[in-house]
Image: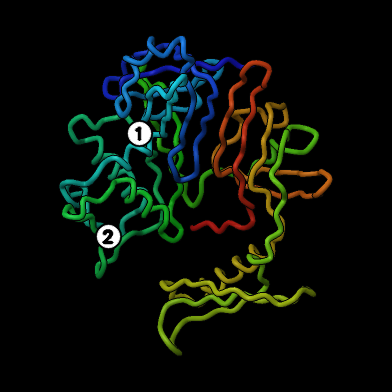
Amino acid sequence: MPAYHYRVHDALTGQVLVHDLPLTGVEFGPGLSEPGDLSGEVPVPFRNLVGAAISPANTVLVVERDDTVVWGGLIWRAEPEGDTFPIEAGGWGSYLHRRHDVHGELDARGPYVHADACQVIRDVWAYAQSQPDGNLNVAVDPMASRTKVGTPAEPYKVEWWEAPVLGDIVDDMTKVEGGPEWTESTLYSDGRLSGQIRLGWPRLGTRRTDIMFASGMNIAEVAPVTYDGDEYAQVIIALGAGEGRGRRRAIDAVRNGRLRMERVLEVPGEKGNDRLAARARRERAARQVLGEVTEIQVIDHPSAPIGSWQIGDDVRVRIHDQWADWDGWCRITGWRIRPPQGDDGERVTLSLARADRLVYGG
């Protein structure tokens, strides 16, 4: 059975404040293009021991599984509630949602014209950590993308008088058509704790043929397979740039013996007929998929050991139970680990999306 340890560091200095924090009822994990989180409780006999060392919004909690760091983030809440002492923490990206641009244009890094969205994300972190007492020792991947932000006519601006939230700027970059994705990790670099923002373009992760999840093997519990007719369509009407009769339009349709269902795809900035037609074709292929698994609980198993997958990976999932006989590729969009406690073993909940429903930029 794996051993879990919880270490508390000072957020600014990196100094270890608690070498092995006693926690129970722990659940934690990262997400796709959003901060991860952690929740747990300090047992009553230890709450006075650790209360003075845990300062919300000023300390970092690190999770180690068999001496391997698997999660890290800032403690945001730690206070007694009756006979319990709950602790809540958020991943590194949660810090940016407590910070604002007080200079404008990220202190002269903007405004942005045809700028790489990945560079804007790096600029946000660089600005946040360049301010006094703002350095969390977070590093951002140096990768580049072909996603461009801002035009000469409409630059992407960050105005100081709006006091924009830095986390919202990062969100803007991931929402751009074909924009990058990100997730978090934690490591010790040169003896110092370091948060890592992993960027991916046109996507994070890859298709994994070396691991899989299946009923009767490593799936302990599964959410029901859903078949949603509201999302189904075999006719896509894609509308691009322009107005009235001059608006770009592409229709992609197939006949497959089912009742005709149509959906409109709005792509107001698309001026290329070929690209608009390709978007319609991808959307139609995605919407013809019926059957989706959104969540599974898995156990440690040689077919997919815990820690062998990453956020963004496509994995094969096979569900066989009294209600479904389903087999498909799913993308991991998040996971939460529940460490072993008492007689209960380690359990991981994977959040999933149908891989063939997703359209990536690039």
With 141 as the anchor, is 156 left or right in this view? left
Outermost front residue: 82
Q: Which quadrant of the figure contains the N terminus?
A: top right
Q: Is residue 285 above or below residue 135?
A: below
Rendering quarter of residue 139: top left
Give the residue displayed 33% in from the left and 37% down from the top. Answer: 95
Mark 1 falls on what kind of element? Answer: strand
Residue at mark 1 = 139
With 69 as the anchor, is 207 left or right in this view? right
Tell how many labels: 2
With 341 as the anchor, is 362 left or right in this view? left
Question: How far across and how far down the image is residue 136, in percent?
Answer: 30, 29
Give the residue displayed 68% in from the left and 49% down from the top. Answer: 293
Residue at mark 2 = 156
With 134 as the anchor, is 36 left or right in this view? right
Outermost bottom residue: 245
Mark closest to the chain's N terminus, 1 or 2: 1
